Amino acid sequence: MREYTDYDGLGLAELVRSKQVSAGELLDAAVTRAEAAQETLNCFTALYPDLAKSQLDSGIGSGPFAGVPFVTKDLAVEVKGAPLTNGSVAWKGNVAQRDSVLTERYRQAGLVFFGQTTSPEYGLTTTTESTLYGQTRNPWDLTRTSGGSSGGASAAVAAGVLPVAQASDGGGSIRIPASCTGLFGIKPSRGRVPMGPGRTEGWNGMSTVHAVSRSVRDSAALLDACHGRETGSRYVAPLPDRPYLEEVSRDPGKLRIALWRKAPNGTMPDADAEAGLVATAKLLEELGHDVVETGPEFDGELLAKYALFTISANIAAAFDDRSEMLGRPVREDEMELITASMAALGRTVPMVELAKANNLFNSVAIDYEQFLIDGGFDLTLSPVTHRAPDKLGTMSLAQDGDAMGKALAGFGAHCPIFNQTGCPAMSVPLHWTDATEDAPGGLPIGMMFGGRLGSESLLFRLAGQLEQARPWAGKRPPHWVG
């Protein structure tokens, strides 16, 4: 069907509802495009159309996305009967024996699962490269990263395989891939989206899940379909006043926005990211908003140290769990080089250091919101990444740790603070670099807006306004399979 990529997810669902197309035809269109994208971009770990057809035979219901093809990321989210390797050799051959709570809610919304997208091992870096699956390439420039850790999802959506895909974010892993591929991506507030049934938080609350999409309304409607308390939740994000989908078309009013250039670790945007920041500030002022150059100050070095301790301890525990499943210890040759070193660190971190980490993240959350209150600010604005997407290989988990760490620290330097505070933040595709030989369409750099815990409604209102003012859905990368 030639018109497949003219529609977002809600648009495809309407075609199914009005019987202009069948869910089976949509599935065939998506699978055909996925196979084409896989050849060029290497963005899928598995395709399982037979599971999708069985789901169709059982009925798709009447949810907002009934009949729309969908894929999950190869990290933590379980689809019963489908592979789940977490991007790790240690998990090769694992098959999910149940649905995650999130999967159940997606099914109720009518989404049809046909595949799984690539992730680096345990989502530990901002590129999507692994020993198990190789390098995932960016459809805007095949020599560059599509971001991480949801780089398979971003590559698939950006290339036209499907309009929206599940993603997750523990330090920027929704926003950075969205930025690298010209998509919309929002990291919800801590406690907004279920992560069970085996747990209700990731990385001590730093990680959460949602999606990358071509349209803002798909992201809003998907969050409407899946947010809310799950069994055993220790905290729940504040409930919205109305559906997020309704917010997309509402006027955000006149906002006061802090233009936050300097990241907590001292990183400043390069010339490309700066150009995007300046253009975005100008657009915001044209739309009637106040933009003030200022930002909160945090100890970036200390934040990075305690984020590393927290994540490393969680990785060590994850490998212990896998060892128990296997009935033997996971070997070092079943881990990426940097992952193995993190797991080793996680076994030596004193317990008091994890308490200090939690205390620091609590104080930073207070300080961030107090900054907004004291300045009368609604949101902050920063570049998602401080430069265009890197060449593949610079941030891989299989290379020298010092070189990788340096590249990582200067890439998405503003992103982790929103994981540490639990606050929501979104990447909006508002800037492309000049064209190059390898990237004739230029390279995307997303602009990030962050707000108070529970402020997704405001973010969606602003995103809807920006989407109307500077539409991006028509921008298509050179490697387009739609």
Image (cartoon, rainbow, N blue to C red):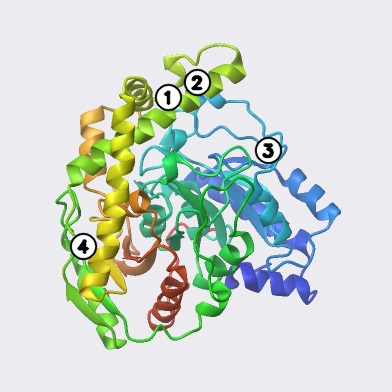
Give yes or no for contact between labels 2 and 1 (Cβ–Cβ under 8 Å).
yes
Q: What residue appears at the point 26 percent right and 55 percent down from the top-left corner?
A: 414
Q: What residue appears at the point 67 percent right and 42 percent down from the top-left corner?
A: 79
Q: Nearer the viewer, mark 3 or mark 4?
A: 3
- Quarter where residue 402 is shown: top left
Q: Nearer the viewer, mark 1 or mark 4?
A: 1
How far is mark 3 from mark 2, CA to CA? 23 Å
Q: Which residue is mark 1?
A: 316
Q: Position of residue 64 (x, y in %)?
A: 69, 69
Give yes or no for contact between labels 4 and 2 (Cβ–Cβ under 8 Å).
no
Give yes or no for contact between labels 1 and 4 (Cβ–Cβ under 8 Å).
no
Q: Position of residue 371 (x, y in %)?
A: 23, 65
Local secondary structure at mark 2:
helix
Give the mark nearer the N terminus: 3 vs 2.
Answer: 3
Give the mark nearer the N terminus: 4 vs 2.
Answer: 4
Q: Nearer the viewer, mark 3 or mark 2?
A: 2
Between 170 and 34, the one nearer to me in the picture: 170
Give the mark nearer the N terminus: 1 vs 4.
Answer: 4
How far is mark 4 from mark 2, CA to CA? 43 Å
> On the rendered structure, is 277 left or right of 323?
left
Local secondary structure at mark 3:
loop
Q: Quadrant of the C terminus?
A: bottom right
Give the mark nearer the N terminus: 3 vs 4.
Answer: 3
> On the rendered structure, is 464 left or right of 164?
left
Q: Which residue is mark 4?
A: 272
Q: Which residue is mark 2?
A: 320
Which kind of residue does numbered mark 2 sit on?
Asp
How far is mark 1 from mark 4, CA to CA? 38 Å
Q: Which residue is mark 3?
A: 82
Residue 192 image label:
none
